[in-house]
Image (spheres, rainbow, N blue to C red):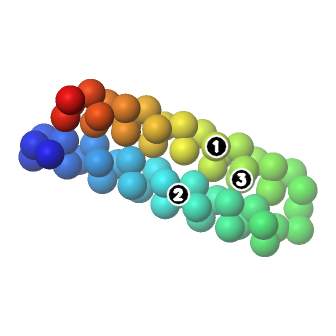
Amino acid sequence: MSPQMLPIAASAEALLDKARRCRRLARQSTDERAASALMALARESEGRAAELAAVLRRAVA
């Protein structure tokens, strides 16, 4: 992987970490609205991470 792609890879990993944290907090939450919002944020973060992964795949191909 080229050096200019490293920040993109790091951003994708950070988004996946954020999604994992949101899912964990959603499971622990007793507030249904908060849990739902956290799950939505997790899905959004995973979607952004997938977009970045696609950019990386195209760059390496």
Q: Quadrant of residue 35?
A: bottom right
Whether 10 is drawn above or below 26: the answer is above
Q: Secondary structure at mark 2?
A: helix
Residue in front for this viewpoint, 49 or 18: 49
Query: Nearer the N terminus, badge 3 or badge 1?
Result: 3
> Is 42 drawn above or below residue 27 in the view shown?
above
Count neighbours of disc 1 (C-alpha within 10 A) and say few if under 14, some if 14 to 19, many if 20 or more.
Answer: some
Left or right position of 50 against 10? right
Q: Earlier in the sequence, mark 2 or mark 1?
A: 2
Image position, residue 38 (x, y; %) = 71, 53
What residue is disc 3 on? 38
Residue marked by disc 2: 18
Q: Which residue is mark 1?
A: 43
Mark 3–mark 1 Cα distance, whole angstroms, equals 9 Å
| Residue type, mark 1 in image | Arg
Give percent across and percent down for residue 53. Answer: 37, 39
Query: Which residue in the rendered view is the most extreme toward the front?
Result: 61
Name which residue lies at 19% across and 41% down. Answer: 5
Side (left or right) of 18 relative to 39: left
Write down the quadrant of residue 61 in the picture.
top left
Q: Nearer the viewer, residue 53 or 11?
A: 53
Q: Residue furthest left?
A: 3
Q: Is residue 13 above or below residue 52?
A: below
Q: Position of residue 33 (x, y in %)?
A: 86, 51
Secondary structure type for disc 1? helix
